[in-house]
Image (tube, rainbow, N blue to C red):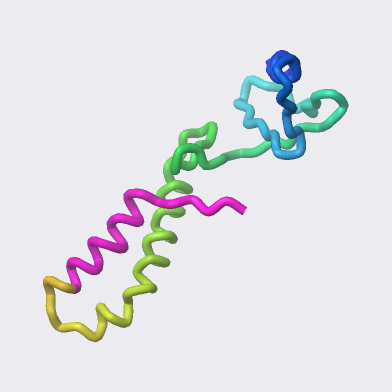
Amino acid sequence: MLADFDRVCGSVGLQLNLTKTIFMKNGWVSDAPFSLNGTNISECSSYVYLRREVNMANDLAPELSRRKRAAWGAFKSVEEVVKKTRNVRLRAHLFDSTVVITALVTVNVYE
């Protein structure tokens, strides 16, 4: 299937970047190495797609852990202000506008 995709891409002038191409396999696929045009394709156990971590087991624990880390990182940016203010409504607003939003919509940073 990937070879067909590469062939069609080549016919319209596009080239597949095989160094960035990865694949994820399920339990039905053999452990044989996967290659295209003599280049080995890397295997991954999970990846982030549309701001959600995807894995073959459909395990949500890594995704929730990732969002939790991002939320704590967002809280650290306003932690001093939250500790210094006595206004409960302001504290709740700061929490809702940083931690809750970050936990719901985690922004991905690609390297």
Q: Residue furthest right?
A: 38
71 shown above or below 2:
below
The answer to if 96 sits in the magenta stretch is: yes
Residue at 74 percent across and 34 percent down: it is 17
Residue at 42 percent across and 59 percent down: it is 70
How far across and how far down the image is residue 1, in percent?
68, 15
94 shown above or below 67:
below
By secondary structure, the bulk of the magenta-drawn segment is best described as: helix
In the image, which residues are magenta?
91-111
The answer to if 17 sits in the magenta stretch is: no
Q: Residue furthest front?
A: 13
* Position of residue 20 in the picture relative to residue 51 (left or right): right
Quadrant of res 46: top right
Q: Nearer the viewer, residue 52 or 58?
A: 52
Q: Nearer the viewer, residue 110 or 61?
A: 110
35 shown above or below 19:
above
How far across and how far down the image is residue 26, in percent?
60, 26
Quadrant of res 42: top right
How far across and how far down the image is residue 15, in percent?
74, 27
* Position of residue 52 in the picture relative to residue 12 (left or right): left
How far across and how far down the image is residue 103, in percent?
34, 54
* Position of residue 31 in the picture relative to residue 102 (left or right): right
12 shown above or below 104:
above
Q: Nearer the viewer, residue 10 or 44?
A: 10
Residue at 25 percent across and 62 percent down: it is 97
